[in-house]
Amino acid sequence: MIYFLQGLTMGLAYVAPIGLQNLFVINTALTQTRSRTYITAFIVIFFDITLALACFFGVGAIMQHSRLLSLIVLLIGSIIVIYIGISLLRSKDSMEKGRDVDIPIPKVITAACVVTWFNPQALIDGSMMLGAFKATLPSDQSAAFIIGVACASCCWFLGLSTVITCFSAKITPKVLRVINLICGAVIIFYGVKLGISFVQLFWQIF
């Protein structure tokens, strides 16, 4: 049980800081129906757990040793993340629930995948953090630890979706516009940061 709790607390510390995933879930909860919000949350949870598993088993080491793979991920991630940010900046400040409910699920899946996986630094940092814990765990307790991490992801994103959905009725279109501008700017910042990393790595290689 102690290792499960360690995984739970580590998972919460890993996922709670405001980043692309949280911004994506928050914006969805503010502009979509409750059902679409939870669908999005479960999609993000899926990618977050797969990322945690990959980090736990050391995919970050592969990223560190494969510069070409890092270049590809950085370039694609930068372009798509910046596109997501620009879309937020250009979005209309409407509070009509469900106005974007017809957004295809594949598009939601793609966006969730990008904000979760297309950040090599997150892969490396996650591998170092979760990998370091893995090295200290008894071999028969690794499963309990990573299950705790997975539960943390479920609790966080479902809880975040619920809280934002409950309070979304009190958010005016003007406030939503400000939130969209802030979220969009932050996401574009992440995208530009990925782009800069791509250029730096490109010059190192070539």
Image (cartoon, helix red, strand yellow):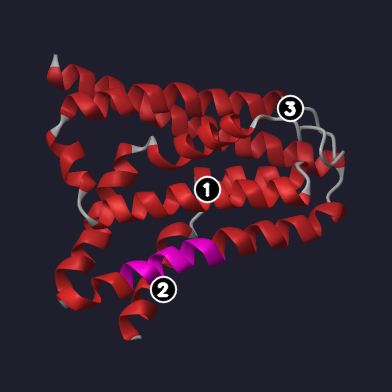
Q: Secondary structure at mark 2?
A: helix
Magenta span: predominant SS is helix
Q: Residue furthest bottom?
A: 1
Q: Earlier in the sequence, mark 3 or mark 2?
A: 2
Q: Secondary structure at mark 1?
A: helix
Cα–Cα span, label 1 and label 2 = 19 Å
Q: Earlier in the sequence, mark 1 or mark 2?
A: 2
Disc 1 residue type (three-letter)? Val
Disc 3 residue type (three-letter)? Ser
Q: Residue at x 39, y 31 (%)?
A: 193
Give left or right: position of 78 versus 21. left
Q: Which mark is residue 54?
A: none
Q: Is residue 57 above or below residue 36?
A: below
Q: Which mark is residue 44?
A: 1
Q: Closer to the camera: disc 3 or disc 1?
A: 1
Residue bearing the label numbered 2: 9
In the rendered image, residue 44, in percent from the top left (x then y), is placed at 52, 48
- Crowding near the residue tagged with mark 2, few <14, some 14–19, many ≥20 C-alpha atoms within 10 Å: some
Q: Range of the magenta residues?
A: 145-155
Residue bearing the label numbered 3: 91
